[in-house]
Amino acid sequence: MYVWTTGFDKDVPGCNAPDVLRTWNTSSACFTHTWDTATKREWLWDTVNNPGREVSRIFVSGMETALQAAFDNGNCDGLENIKALMEEGHTLVIWSAFATSIR
């Protein structure tokens, strides 16, 4: 299972599926990280542990942005979501994380 860097977020005010489908733009505010909050990670873990359809591996994208920003700014405060993702993912599923570009 591949977890996209961003996904449609129905909880963003003003974002509804019919409008987004008509004007598909993954750069809009309607698309957010799919793993960067406790609620989103809970949904992810529930999805990969669905009885009878368990997923043994997920590949998570999008961490490179947070890692690069922490490196560039010399500030690791924004890495808490990555740390939580790794800790939670390690106990729930066998998984891999990857980054597309680390300088």
Image (tube, rainbow, N blue to C red):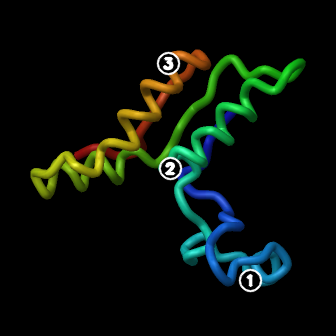
Residue 50 percent location from the top left of the image? 81, 26
Residue 10 vertical position relative to residue 86 in the rendered view, above or below:
below
Closer to us: 102 or 85: 85
- Disc 1 designates what residue? 23
The mark closer to the camera, 3 or 2, is: 2
Task: Specify few, some or many for label 2: CA neighbours under 10 Å numbering under 14, 14-19, or 20 or more.
Answer: some
- Disc 2 designates what residue? 37
Gap between marks 3 and 2 measured at Cα: 17 Å
- Left/right placement of residue 40 relative to residue 56 reads left
Gap between marks 1 and 3 measured at Cα: 37 Å
Hey, what amino acid is under mark 2? Thr
Residue 25 percent location from the top left of the image? 64, 76
Which image quarter is the N terminus in? top right
Q: What label does residue 72 carry, if any?
A: none
Residue 102 location, quadrant: top left
Tag 1 near tag 2, CB within 8 Å: no
Circle 1 SS class: loop
Q: Earlier in the sequence, mark 1 or mark 3?
A: 1
Circle 2 SS class: loop
Hey, what amino acid is under mark 3? His
- Left/right placement of residue 28 relative to residue 86 reads right
- Disc 3 designates what residue? 90
Hey, what amino acid is under mark 1? Thr
